[in-house]
Image (cartoon, rainbow, N blue to C red):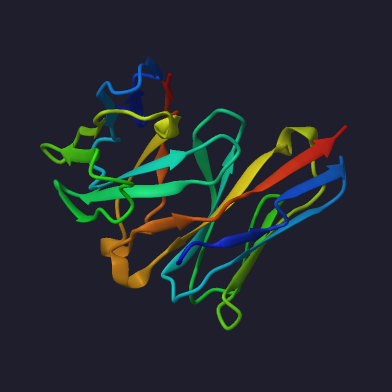
Amino acid sequence: SQQGEEDPQALSIQEGENATMNCSYKTSINNLQWYRQNSGRGLVHLILIRSNEREKHSGRLRVTLDTSKKSSSLLITASRAADTASYFCATVFYNQGGKLIFGQGTELSVKP
Amino acid sequence: GAGVSQSPSNKVTEKGKDVELRCDPISGHTALYWYRQSLGQGLEFLIYFQGNSAPDKSGLPSDRFSAERTGGSVSTLTIQRTQQEDSAVYLCASSLGISGGNTGELFFGEGSRLTVL
């Protein structure tokens, strides 16, 4: 399967702590994207990192990419209760015209 | 439109009936995707369109599932002779694709929740 694998499947932290989620994939990619899903809603794009980038920041989000290990991590700093959601990585395959394959997701719970 | 629109938002049907789910993508988005999400699970890729053609139908679970896209815009996902295991949220997304420097970022609709009794 070309699907990304994420860990942990579930993460529970206190407000103010940092949350780290990891994603691994199997084949060469064009870029890797992270999405957030609130319960029962559609997904919202958070941040994208291209295959030639190693690190990217957006507000409290930091994403890294290690193409040699075929892995990425998403760090949310100073978490808030409103960050409670499921987070998915999605890989865009270079030779498949932009097809996105999603991982199983990490369910993050931030307790006030 | 301003965003991706899906209808119906909820559909309850009896086993064996056919259902049609509709997706209206963002205007100008050439790529359109269908995913399925069962309760508490990740997204299962079904099919994607580039324009009106579907380069990849590999995710369709069986020949009861079909999809079409007309005019490079609206898409319909049809499930024939529905089964209980078809119960899920069906998500549609659109994007500008990855040509011309685009990144393939997806914009999702709110989904169609299908319940097969």
> In this view of the protein, which residue sits in the foreground, A48 or B61?
B61
Image-based side of A17 in relation to B11, left or right? right
* Image quadrant assignment for residue B75: top left
Which image quarter: residue A47?
A: bottom right
Image coordinates for residue A83, horizontal then vertical, percent? 72, 38
Residue B31 visible in the picture: yes
Number of numbered labels in the structure image: 0
Inspect this view and state whether residue B109 appears. Answer: no
Query: Which residue shows up at 73% across the image and 56% down it?
Result: A8
From the top left corner, tell me how far across and down residue A74 is, in percent.
67, 58
Q: Nearer the viewer, residue B74 or B19?
A: B19
Residue located 12% across and 37% down the image: B70
Relative to B8, does residue B107 appear above or below in the rendering? below
Viewport quadrant of the C terminus of chain B = top left
Q: Residue furthest left?
A: B71
Residue with the most extreme bottom position: A68
Residue at (63% x, 59% y) in the render: A6
| Location of residue A38 in the rendering, given as x and y in whole percent from the top left corner | 61, 33
Question: Which image quarter holds the N terminus of chain B?
Answer: top left
Q: Nearer the viewer, residue B74 or B60?
A: B60
> x, y percentage for residue A4?
54, 62
Residue in the picture at 60% in, 38% down: B40
